[in-house]
Image (cartoon, rainbow, N blue to C red):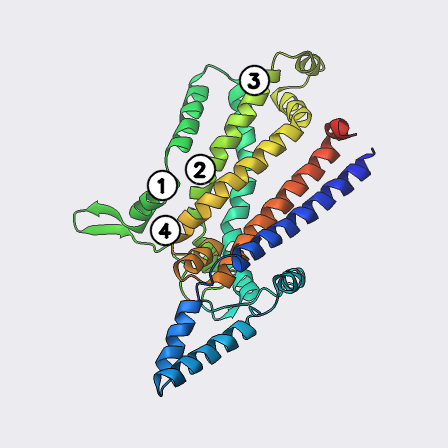
Amino acid sequence: MSVRALAARRVVLAVLSVYLVFTLSFAFVALTPDPNTGSVRFAAASSCSGTSEERAECIERKMAAYRQANNLDEPVVERYVDWLVAMSTLEWGASAEARSEVLTAIRASVPYTLLYVVPSMLLSAAGGLAAGAYLALNPGGTVDRVGTAATYLGFGLPNFWIAAFLLAVVGKAYVLPGSYILSWDPRVQPGMGPMDPGTWARMVMPVAVLSTTLFANQLRHGRAEVLEHAGSELVKMVRSKGFGDRGVTRHVFRMTAPLLLSLFVVDLFGVILVNIFVIEYVFDMPGFGSLSLRAIKNRDVPLLLGTTMVVAIVGIAGNLLKDLATLALDPRVGDGER
C-alpha cells in the first residue's frame, strides 16, 4: 500500500471517528432524561390557572409544545438523522447561558485560549528539546544536575499552585510592611478583545504556567533520545565529519522525529485538556475552558455538548495530523499496515 493510500485510510478513519462522537452524543441526549423537563413543567404549572383539570390540560399542552419544538415527539431514527445533518452543517443549537448560538459562543472564546496555548506549544517544543539535547551532550555537570532537578520540579508542582503563586508575587510585590511596588491584575478585563494589546500582555503568566509541564516533558524526551544515540555509529560518523554538538543534535532529532512528534502530541493533549480549565479559572479568563465550566455549572446541555464535541474533534484532528506528519517524516512507519 502506498503512502498516499495510507494517508487516505487515516483520513477516512478520522472522519468515521468524528461521526462516532456525534452518535455517542446523540445517545447521551436521546437515551437519558431531559434535564430541562422539570423547569419547563414548573414554568407551565406557574403560568396555568383554572380548575385542576384545566391546569393539568394546560401543563400537558405546554409540555407537548416543548417536545414538538425540540423534536422530541419524533421517532428516534428520524431524530438521529436530523442530528447528524445538524452536526454536519454546524447547526449546533442555541445556548441559554451564553444567550447566543453554541458555535458563536465557542468562536468568541477560542481565541483567548489560543493566545496562550500556541506560544506554550512553540516554546515547549523548541526550547524543551534544545535544552534536553544540551544537557545530554554535557552530562554529569552542574548544569545537567540542575536541569534534571528542574524537570522533576516542573512535573511535581501542580499548575494551580504555580498560578496562585504568580498571582501572589506579581499581583503584590511587597518591599515594606503595608506597602508594595508592583500591583498588576492579570485578568482579562471586560471589553478587551483577543487582539487588544492589554489582552496579549495578560497572557504572559498563563503561558508561563502552561509551559511548565510541557517544557519539562520535552526536555526529558529530548535528553533521553540524545543520550540513547550519543554512542551510536551514526553519531560517531557525524562527529568524524567535523560536526559539533549542533550537527549531532540535528541528526539525532531527524532520526527520532516520528517518536518525538508522537510523544509531543500525547503530552500536549494530556496537559492542555486538564490545565486550560485550571488556568482560565484562576486567571478569570473568558476562554474555552471557562465557557465549558459555565456550561457544566448551569447545566446548559447544548453548550456542554458543543464544547465536548469540539474537544473530541480537535483530539481526532490532532491525532490525524500527527499520523500524516509521521508518514511524511518516515514512510516506513506504515509498513505494518501494508
Quarter holding residue 56: bottom left
Report crowding for label 2: few under 14, some 14 to 19, many 20 or more residues within 10 A (C-alpha).
many
Q: Report the residue marked by disc 2.
A: 212
Where is residue 1? Give x, y as percent.
83, 33
Q: Helix, strand or loop at disc 4?
A: helix
Between discs 1 and 4, the one toward the N terminus: 1
Contact between marks 1 and 4 (CB within 8 A): the answer is no
Q: Helix, strand or loop at disc 1?
A: helix
Q: Helix, strand or loop at disc 3?
A: helix
Callout 1, which amino acid?
Ile
From the viewer's perspective, is 239 left or right of 279? Answer: right
Between discs 3 and 1, the one toward the N terminus: 1
At a point 34% along the width and 56% down the height, the residue shown is 185
At a point 69% along the width and 16% down the height, the residue shown is 238
Which of the pair 66/211 is nearer the observer?
66
Q: Report the residue marked by disc 1.
A: 162
Where is residue 242? Give x, y as percent.
69, 16
Q: Report the residue marked by disc 3.
A: 227
Callout 3, which amino acid?
Leu
